[in-house]
């Protein structure tokens, strides 16, 4: 494993442990309102901003990230099938369906199609379709967080969001959402270079002939 690989694994482990402590011991994110609180928004946004800054300013880290397997990274999105939990909680009246169903079914769609996308679309020939699917995955995450924050404005006296502000469900918006978003960013960044690389290889092959 490279130096940046070890650093990344260590940071993700610390991040995950910190999210668990903040949720299960400190109860930082818990609230009984019908919306996610500002602390959840901060926790889901800051890791993405820190990644973007590191990716932009560190050539070594950027080369490490761009060298990861887009197919393997896409397969990690299979974990999004956990969205079925939101659908179930929405059906049982534990979470507002205005949030639970779009967020849950969106995650399930991405999780159920991730294997096919990794197998068939993670190539230069299907670059456009691959990027489009990654964009859908990002849109699903943004929509879920947006609904979690704004649901209370639409239905101020409706079912509360408390179930997702406590451990273990709180790990979804504070850890898994930003992690999956970062994975999408890396995959899109890689795919944007596939056409150029493919073209350069064809040109080199033509010259060789």
Image: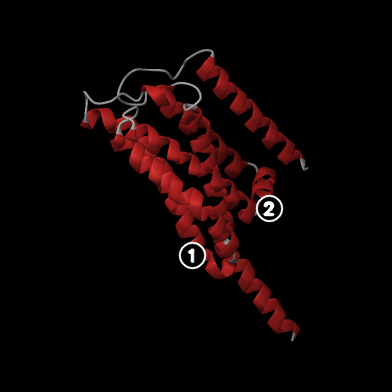
Question: Which SS class for mark 1?
Answer: helix
Which quarter of the figure has residue 92? Answer: top left
The C terminus: image quadrant: bottom right
State the residue position of label 1.
Answer: 128
Q: Residue at x 40, y 24 (%)?
A: 163
What residue is at 43 percent from the left and 42 percent from the top?
141
Q: Is residue 163 left or right of residue 111?
A: left
Going from N to C along the chain, the mark reached first, 2 or 1, is: 2
The residue under label 2 is 67
Near mark 2 (Cα within 10 A), the count class, few <14, some 14-19 or many ≥20, is few
Q: Which mark is residue 169?
A: none
- The number of callouts visible is 2
Question: Could you say which is closer to the camera, residue 191 or residue 101?
Answer: 101
Label 1 packing within 10 angstroms: few (<14), some (14-19), many (20+): some
**How was this image coloured?**
secondary structure
- Quadrant, the N terminus: top right
User: Vertically, is 174 above or below 57?
Assistant: above
| Location of residue 183 by image quarter | top right
Q: Nearer the viewer, residue 70 or 114?
A: 114
Q: Which of these two is toward me, 79 or 48?
A: 79
Q: Position of residue 205 (x, y in %)?
A: 71, 80
Dot 2 falls on a residue whose secondary structure is loop
Counting from the top left corner in percent of width and height, residue 118 is at: 58, 58
**Which residue, as the protein is rendered here, is positioned at the far bottom?**
209
Q: CA distance from mark 2 to mark 1?
A: 20 Å
Q: Residue at x 57, y 38 (%)?
A: 51
| Image position, residue 136 (x, y; %) | 42, 52
């Amino acid at each position: 494993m490279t130096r940046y690989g070890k650093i990344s694994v260590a940071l993700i482990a610390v991040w995950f442990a910190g999210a668990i402590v903040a949720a299960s011991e400190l109860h930082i994110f818990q609230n009984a309102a019908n919306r996610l609180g500002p602390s959840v928004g901060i926790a889901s946004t800051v890791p993405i901003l820190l990644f973007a800054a590191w990716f932009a300013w560190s050539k070594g880290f950027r080369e490490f990230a761009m060298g990861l397997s887009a197919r393997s990274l896409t397969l990690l999105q299979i974990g999004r099938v956990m969205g079925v939990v939101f659908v179930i909680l929405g059906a049982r009246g534990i979470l507002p369906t205005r949030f639970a169903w779009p967020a849950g079914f969106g995650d399930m769609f991405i999780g159920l199609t991730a294997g096919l996308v990794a197998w068939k679309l993670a190539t230069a020939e299907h670059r456009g379709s691959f990027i489009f699917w990654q964009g859908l995955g990002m849109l699903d995450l943004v929509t879920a967080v947006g609904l979690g924050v704004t649901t209370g404005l639409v239905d101020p006296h409706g079912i509360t969001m408390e179930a997702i502000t406590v451990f273990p469900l709180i790990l979804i918006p504070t850890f898994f959402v930003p992690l999956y978003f970062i994975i999408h960013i890396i995959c899109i960044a890689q795919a944007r270079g596939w056409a150029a690389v493919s073209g350069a290889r064809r040109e080199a092959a033509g010259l060789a002939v």
